[in-house]
């Protein structure tokens, strides 16, 4: 059972241990990250115990979500129908379980609900509840067991109980004391991300619960849990030989894909359900180039798939193809997080609008293609810059100038400043090996913004000193983050060691002259006038 719920082994063990005997009458499970997942795990454990061969240790449980059961009648009916394994059907008038007594209703008030629970308990003692869960209503048990003396335990699991505290606060105390009110073996489990102290009724109305705390999942547990979804889908495939996004041969690629996605998104989201939602939305687009290469091998001769002797079977991609895919798709992981985590867009619609172009791997990155919306007759040698924001393009142009020009030529840019003090402040010492320190790139960036970006800025009347607005812009944390992101996707090459602490990091420009010139024309920057030796 624990192996089916990666990362929740401790919760599985604790619930199993408690309900192997007689559990406390009131339990409170706190999961600050994903109470929904914790509730599913609790329900799975109780379902396993319900199928126990020992009838004395069985549980008859119902699980309700307080968000859906927004009034007391819905809650009462849902609990009784699940405990009695009664399926509400439209053909039968959508009637609720009434214990065989026509016209009997258990949802009028709390007193009626208690009588309904006693009726369910009496039905269990008679052995009329089908434990196998066939929803037939009455299925006599055939094992030799005296239901009248000990028929197991009734358990009610309430997910998101804090909503009950907001909408039906008078119901919290009776639910926590159901064992006292019904006078038979019964437990109520609250599963929430809100601490019990924040919703505890005043004046000691509720008993103190048995606390169960769920720890956040580690990265290894998250990977294992997300990978289990792929394994389940690949095993359920009706045609495992045909190429599809969940082909068994793509498991290793999916594991690598998840590792990169978690590195990008787990800082902001730790809920495994949300991460699975984002991973499922981006995965078909991520694996589409592999499937296209399999369907049209003649169009992609440079992608040599290996790992399978059969020519017709889908073969896992080699490491260089995997790294190319990760480098291309990694920026889209954060875009998926921003759109899908707050549910700003439907996952299928977002995936369709962000579908990669056909034959993405057919041409190596060194071949040329036009820059979209560049407004220039110049071609660039890398598709990674097509969707870069305006500031990132300025940084690339500044990095190209810093990597190409000697430091002594910077006076041509800095000398254009209106303030002599500002010009001296932006002079820096030379760097070695054709690399440029980050502060020199920022200085050139400031000069480019001051001369070429003034007309594109939003009004900022609070900046009255010349150059003050530019100094504020290049000092923002977002500029440094953009430099790191450009380095991660290979448009800037880090020349200094990552763990080096003495001095700012050093970068080399990773784009060609044609690319830098196209970006400069797009930004209306006269790059040739700023180059020491233009091509």
Image (tube, grey):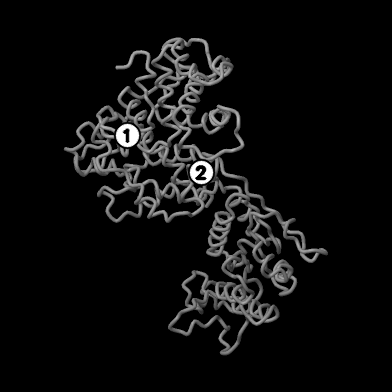
Tell which tag, 1 or 2, sits nearer the viewer: 1
Residue 281 placement (x, y as % from top left):
40, 50
In this rendering, is residue 99 above or below 184?
A: below
Residue lying farthest bottom? 102
Residue 144 placement (x, y as % from top left):
56, 72
Depth check: give the residue in front, 342 or 252. 342
At a point 49% along the width and 16% down the height, the residue shown is 415
Residue named by callout 2: 222
Depth check: give the residue in front, 390 or 194. 390
Q: Is residue 483 left or right of residue 476?
A: left
Q: Earlier in the sequence, mark 1 or mark 2?
A: 2
Depth check: give the residue in front, 134 or 215. 215
User: 10 Å neighbourhood of mark 1: few (<14), some, or many (≥20)?
Assistant: some
In this rendering, is residue 135 above or below 44?
A: below
User: 10 Å neighbourhood of mark 2: few (<14), some, or many (≥20)?
Assistant: many
Residue named by callout 1: 383
At a point 24% along the width and 33% down the height, the residue shown is 363
């Amino acid at each position: 059972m624990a192996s089916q719920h990666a990362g929740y082994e401790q919760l599985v063990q604790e619930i199993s241990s408690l309900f192997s005997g007689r559990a406390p009458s009131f339990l409170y499970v706190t999961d600050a990250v994903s109470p929904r997942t914790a509730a599913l795990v609790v329900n799975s454990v109780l379902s396993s115990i319900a199928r126990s061969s020992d009838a004395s240790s069985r549980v008859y449980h119902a699980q309700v979500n307080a968000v859906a059961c927004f009034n007391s009648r819905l809650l009462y009916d849902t609990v009784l129908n699940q405990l009695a394994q009664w399926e509400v059907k439209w053909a039968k008038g959508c009637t609720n379980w009434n214990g065989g007594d026509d016209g009997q209703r258990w949802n009028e008030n709390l007193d009626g609900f208690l009588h309904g629970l006693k009726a369910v308990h009496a039905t269990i003692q008679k052995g009329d509840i089908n434990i196998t869960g066939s929803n037939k209503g009455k299925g006599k048990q055939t094992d030799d067991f005296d239901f009248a003396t000990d028929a197991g335990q009734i358990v009610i699991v309430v997910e998101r109980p804090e909503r009950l505290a907001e909408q039906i606060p008078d119901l919290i105390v009776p639910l926590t004391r159901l064992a006292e009110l019904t006078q038979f073996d019964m437990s109520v489990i609250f599963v929430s991300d809100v601490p019990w102290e924040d919703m505890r009724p005043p004046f000691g109305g509720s008993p103190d619960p048995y606390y169960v705390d769920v720890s956040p999942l580690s990265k290894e547990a998250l990977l294992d849990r997300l990978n289990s979804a792929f394994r389940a889908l690949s095993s359920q495939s009706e045609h495992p030989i045909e190429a599809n996004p969940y082909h068994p041969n793509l498991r290793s690629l999916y594991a690598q894909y998840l590792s990169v996605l978690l590195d990008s998104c787990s800082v902001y989201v730790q809920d495994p359900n949300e991460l699975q939602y984002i991973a499922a939305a981006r995965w078909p687009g991520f694996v589409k180039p592999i499937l296209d290469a399999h369907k049209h091998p003649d169009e992609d001769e440079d992608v040599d798939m290996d790992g399978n002797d059969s020519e017709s079977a889908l073969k896992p991609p080699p490491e260089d193809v995997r790294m190319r895919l990760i480098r291309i798709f990694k920026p889209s992981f954060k875009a998926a997080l921003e759109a899908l985590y707050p549910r700003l867009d439907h996952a299928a619609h977002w995936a369709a609008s962000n579908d990669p172009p056909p034959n993405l791997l057919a041409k190596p990155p060194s071949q040329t293609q036009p820059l979209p919306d560049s407004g220039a007759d110049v071609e660039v040698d890398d598709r990674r810059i097509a969707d870069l924001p305006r500031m990132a393009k300025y940084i690339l142009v500044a990095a190209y100038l810093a990597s190409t020009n000697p430091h002594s030529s910077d006076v041509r840019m800095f000398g254009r400043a209106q303030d002599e003090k500002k010009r001296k402040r932006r002079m820096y010492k030379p760097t070695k090996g054709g690399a440029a320190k980050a502060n020199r790139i920022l200085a050139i960036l400031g000069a480019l913004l001051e001369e070429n970006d003034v007309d594109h800025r939003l009004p900022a009347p609070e900046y009255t000193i010349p150059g003050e607005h530019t100094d504020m812009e290049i000092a923002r944390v977002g500029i440094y983050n953009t430099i790191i992101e450009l380095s991660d996707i290979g448009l800037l090459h880090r020349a200094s060691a990552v763990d080096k602490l003495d001095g700012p990091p050093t970068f080399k420009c990773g784009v060609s002259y044609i690319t830098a010139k196209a970006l400069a024309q797009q930004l209306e920057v006269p790059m040739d006038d700023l180059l020491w030796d233009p091509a």
